[in-house]
């Protein structure tokens, strides 16, 4: 490393350290870096980590909550979806807020924290039953002055009958910027879903401040990429996953999902802006700054759920503030954060045409030339798992040979279409982290092939030209994926060079490991990595283990088994002079539901011995 390069990293690291010493936001900060500048725990001592405290959830349900830590208090989700404040040094309960018994949907992956400049007001903001609610962060009491009797109805203001929506709120938290709570939404995946507006609300009053229409109204940019008045009938193009904010510039980065219905788009002909886009919006006003559409006219459910990652890289001899977006297809898109210009060429390549009645697949799709993909993008009979039974092997071989199988953007078909890494593969929510100063990107990815089979929609006399997919994951009778392992991978990139530094299987399948079959990667992960200034990557997996890796080479430095499988993003924080790492261990483990064990869920925190 030359002197100028070393100086760049040293100065950048100093600036980053000041912004990443706490864990007050979902994913560690508004930039979604999943990075901590704390370095009490490092490569030399991580092997000494011991259990510091445990908080038992106590209801046997599955949780994937990512904790938030403020001062000496850690906020988690506990029994029966309650929101709980714990002492950060001991895990002892301070208070608990229990939502009403009729709560059917709640923000269960994390929570939003806001405080006034003088820190006299502190609030926790979340959504339940399609309404935003606010708690006093010091007492856990519902703030009745927020909205109307303590709630803001998210079904209102979308331009349609609110009673027609069955789902609006996301289970992922939004982002707090200054005195705004910025939210995406979940909109179901079928016909007639709600439009996926991005909205900002005043954190004190609950008043709507701005709205960005991801399905444009007449006169708005992108309107011509849809049929006339599509906003009245078509839904989606929503942000159900994660968003990031450049707080210094006041820019929101939001990755949107596909328009709905997911797999058939005859009623939404066109490129469908702003579906499947990385949007850069003015966080104060909601005005579009730039966008890039990563899938035109999505009929594959290739939404990007992972937060855009903000980092600084050395590129073309210059320091570039960049934003990196990882995808379900296994791609890494990297842009100048301010201008939206790609750091490496992205080519529009011709794609196969659809043979479905009424469907018109887009003729080209964007394909990054660099960095290389982190997931496998093809699935043939040569890729079948060696652990399949004779019957399963024959079944999958027949499915592969009879289906359309022409790459990532093979349109869904009546005779079936192979998807790889699959619409539930690649990177998902929480699935990436960065060292913001060094240009390092870490990705947890899943290879899970899918088979799409298009069928006529039954009982629809009004719309004769509608189809739905009988899609399913290509899973064997023993619960294992049809493709040969690894099924989950941990990949580390140097985005200064646009190259992969190293890649390893992440985790194991306990049933196979017991037979001496290792390095398979775990199955069905929804876990997020975190990076620390101590040179470490921490992550949990569904094999009930938490691990620490050397970020420079992937060497396993620490491993600990816990009581349950893990999901979500761990939190790294300092309290009382001690650095902690806390995981949510509350997911089922077992290849099939019939074999899954009873959950003994808990939050487990590790630290160095005093």
Image: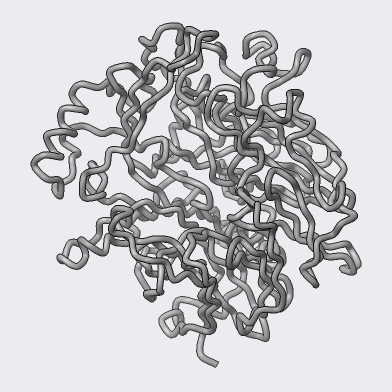
Q: Residue furthest bottom?
A: 610
What residue is rendered at 51% in x and 75% in y? 604
- Quarter of the figure with residue 470: top left
Taking the image as drawn, is residue 531 in sight? yes
| Position of residue 512 measured from the top left corner of the image (x, y, whole percent) | 20, 61
Front-most of residues 350 and 29: 29
What residue is rendered at 57% in x and 25% in y? 259
- Quarter of the figure with residue 581: bottom right
Taking the image as drawn, is residue 21 in sight? no
* Label total for image: 0
Q: Image height check: is 525 above or below 517? A: above
- Quarter of the figure with residue 4: bottom right
Front-most of residues 142 and 319: 142
Q: Image height check: is 270 above or below 17? A: above
Is 70 positioned to the left or the right of 274 in the image?
right
| Position of residue 208 measured from the top left corner of the image (x, y, whole percent) | 84, 39
| Position of residue 444 measured from the top left corner of the image (x, y, whole percent) | 43, 52
Q: For the C terminus, which image quadrant? A: bottom right
| Position of residue 255 measured from the top left corner of the image (x, y, whole percent) | 60, 37
Is 29 positioned to the left or the right of 560 in the image?
right
What residue is rendered at 45% in x and 64% in y? 539
Q: Residue furthest left?
A: 390
What residue is rendered at 33% in x and 42% in y? 448
């Amino acid at each position: 490393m030359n002197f100028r390069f070393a100086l760049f990293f040293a100065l950048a690291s100093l600036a980053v350290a000041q912004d990443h010493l706490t864990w007050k936001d979902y994913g560690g900060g508004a930039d979604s870096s999943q990075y901590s500048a704390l370095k009490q725990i490092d490569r030399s001592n991580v092997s000494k980590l011991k259990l510091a405290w445990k908080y038992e959830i106590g209801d046997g349900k599955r949780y994937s909550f990512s904790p938030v830590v403020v001062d000496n208090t850690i906020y988690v989700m506990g029994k029966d979806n309650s929101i709980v404040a714990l002492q950060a040094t001991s895990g002892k309960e301070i208070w608990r807020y229990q939502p009403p018994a009729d709560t059917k949907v709640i923000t269960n992956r994390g929570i939003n924290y806001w405080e006034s400049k003088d820190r006299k007001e502190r609030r926790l903001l979340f959504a339940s039953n399609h309404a935003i609610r606010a708690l006093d962060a010091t007492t856990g009491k519902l703030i009745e002055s927020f909205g109307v009797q303590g709630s803001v109805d998210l079904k209102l203001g979308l331009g349609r009958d609110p009673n027609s929506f069955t789902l609006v709120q996301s289970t992922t938290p939004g982002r707090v910027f200054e005195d705004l709570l910025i939210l995406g939404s979940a909109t179901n995946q079928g016909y007639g879903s709600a439009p996926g507006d991005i909205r900002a609300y005043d954190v004190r009053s609950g008043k709507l401040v701005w709205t960005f229409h991801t399905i444009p109204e007449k006169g708005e940019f992108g309107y011509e990429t849809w049929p006339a008045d599509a906003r009245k009938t078509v839904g989606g193009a929503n942000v159900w996953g994660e968003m990031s904010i450049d707080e210094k510039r006041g820019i929101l980065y939001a990755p949107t999902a596909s328009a709905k219905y997911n797999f058939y788009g005859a009623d939404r002909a066109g490129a469908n802006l702003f579906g499947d886009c990385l949007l850069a919006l003015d966080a104060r006003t909601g005005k579009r700054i730039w966008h890039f559409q990563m899938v035109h006219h999505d009929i594959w459910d290739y939404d990007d759920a992972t937060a855009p990652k903000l980092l600084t890289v050395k590129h073309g001899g210059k320091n570039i503030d960049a934003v990196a977006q990882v995808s379900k297809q296994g791609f890494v898109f990297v842009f100048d954060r301010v201008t939206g210009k790609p750091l490496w060429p992205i080519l529009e390549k011709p794609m196969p045409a659809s043979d479905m009645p009424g469907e018109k697949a887009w003729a080209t799709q964007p394909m990054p030339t660099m960095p290389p993909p982190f997931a496998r993008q093809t699935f043939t009979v040569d890729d079948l798992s060696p652990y399949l039974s004779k019957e399963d092997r024959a079944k999958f071989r027949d499915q592969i040979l009879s289906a359309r199988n022409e790459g990532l953007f093979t349109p869904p078909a009546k005779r079936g279409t192979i998807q790889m890494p699959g619409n539930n593969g690649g990177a998902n929510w929480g699935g990436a982290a960065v060292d913001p100063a060094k240009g390092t990107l870490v990705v947890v990815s899943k290879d899970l092939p899918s088979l799409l089979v298009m069928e006529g929609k039954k009982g629809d006399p009004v719309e004769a030209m509608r189809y739905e997919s009988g899609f399913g994951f290509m899973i064997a009778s023993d619960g294992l994926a049809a493709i040969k392992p690894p099924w989950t991978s941990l990949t580390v990139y140097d985005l200064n060079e646009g190259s992969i530094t190293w890649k390893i299987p992440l985790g194991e399948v306990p049933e196979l490991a017991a037979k001496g079959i290792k390095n398979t990667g775990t199955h069905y992960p929804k876990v997020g990595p975190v990076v620390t200034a101590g040179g470490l990557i921490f992550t949990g997996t569904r094999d009930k283990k938490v691990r620490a890796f050397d970020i420079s080479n992937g060497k396993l430095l620490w491993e600990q088994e816990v009581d349950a499988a893990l999901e979500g993003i761990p939190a790294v924080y300092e309290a009382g002079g001690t650095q902690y790492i806390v995981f949510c261990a509350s997911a089922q483990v077992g290849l099939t539901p019939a074999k899954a064990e009873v959950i003994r869920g808990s939050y487990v925190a590790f630290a160095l011995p005093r």
